[in-house]
Amino acid sequence: MMDWPTRTPTPPCLPELAEVLVTLRAEAGDDTGGHPGDNVLDALRDSGVLRLPVPAEYGGLGADWTDANAVIAGLARADASVAIIVFLHYAAVSRMTTYGSEEQRKRFLTAVARDGRIFASSWSEPGADAAKQKIATTAVPRADGCWELNGAKTFTTGAGVADHYLVLARTGEEDAAPGSYGRPDQGIFVVDSTRPGFTVDGVLDLSGMRRSATGLIRLDGYLTEPGDVLIHSRETPAVIGHPHTLGLTLGAVALGIAEEAHDTAIDIGRRRSLLGNPLYRHHVFELGSRLAAIRGVVESATRADGDRTGHALTAKVFASETAEVVCRGAQELAGSSAFSRNHSLNRLSQDARALTLMGPPNYLCRELVATHLGVQ
């Protein structure tokens, strides 16, 4: 039987990825703490993973977003939870690179490249809708140029792991016309996890992405520094959606999940001497064809000219939902053993399902793309 090209190539600018994957695989099945272990975080900080898309003038590798998606897919093969953390870090880096002031870029991007600082985004809140229209967290300006932040955030991926958080907060009375994702009377603030007023309230017990440190944070009278405001204008919705315009897509996480599920199905067939069975081979072919479609959609997201939002969101929807199908097919080939809680295919399947619900969730992605195309 022919060998499928099942692995997304590692970018040549990041040879350390293989070492990171070894560390990830060593503890990927241990989700009891709800977050990556110190060994994984140390491996990420010591490698070039975190600084991959940071421009070279700030000490980064200056890689493009095709390489960023490839690294995310590679990480997801070993641990989709860590891939999500890195994806959100890359998204934050892209926002800082484009919308940050020169002082902010020197301050924050250099810290990523030199010290391995991790960024996270904190948009969601209890009772807020998926489009982030109803945010209760407030940011009040002070005479000294600082802002005071108060509120609670939930479903913050990387809670307690990240060093800095891009926090979405309400800066007005919400009387402005809403955007498609976020509102123009909101702002995005860089929050330092070591400063007073910032608290992590623990991680959630999720059914998928169980090691992603997705949890709750609180801001109680948190005072920013004058240079901690990324944006507080009508551009806020554009800043939220900016990574998608580059083609950075959560579909890359789904690609890694599907690659790993497909390879697992082949390995099971080899161990059980089933690859000589035509029916088994045909099932594996179907999984491989779906995997090829996922790869094509994800890779095309960064090839489009201009605004790549539609391509990135479409890749997220198609890849995550098709990865679910690939995982389910691999489970059926593995038999009842795959439904053991500790079986890697069960974990992959749960991670693929969780990905369809992560922001923006797939139903909102469809709405955003349809609106972008002028379809009502």
Image (cartoon, rainbow, N blue to C red):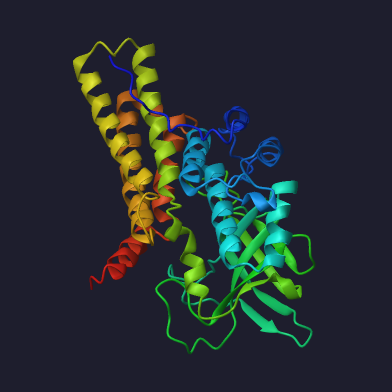
Residue 204 appears in view: no
**Against 102, is 147 above or below?**
below
Residue visible at 61% across and 68% down in the picture: 167
Q: Which quadrant would residue 260 be assigned to in this image?
A: top left
How many marks the image carries: the answer is: 0
Q: Residue furthest front?
A: 57
181 on left or right of 278: right
Looking at the image, is 134 positioned above or below residue 261?
below
Q: Quadrant of residue 19?
A: top right
In the shown orientation, is residue 339 left or right of residue 149? left
Q: Is residue 247 something one can see in this rendering?
A: yes
Q: Picture coordinates of residue 228 (x, y %)?
A: 70, 70
Horizontal side of 78 relative to 131 (left or right) equals right
The quarter of the picture where the N terminus appears is top left
Q: Nearer the viewer, residue 39 or 248?
A: 248
Percent across and percent down for residue 47 are 66, 37
Quadrant housing residue 21: top right
Query: In which quadrant of the rendered image does the C terminus lie?
Result: bottom left
Give left or right: position of 237 versus 146. Answer: left
**Picture coordinates of residue 189, whole percent (x, y):** 64, 70
In this rendering, is residue 289 above or below 140?
A: above
Residue at figure coordinates x 59%, y 53% from the top left: 89
Q: Is residue 207 above or below residue 129?
A: above
**Residue 309 drawn at (x, y percent):** 38, 60
**In front here: 138 or 141?**
141
Give the residue drawn at x 70%, y 84%. Answer: 141
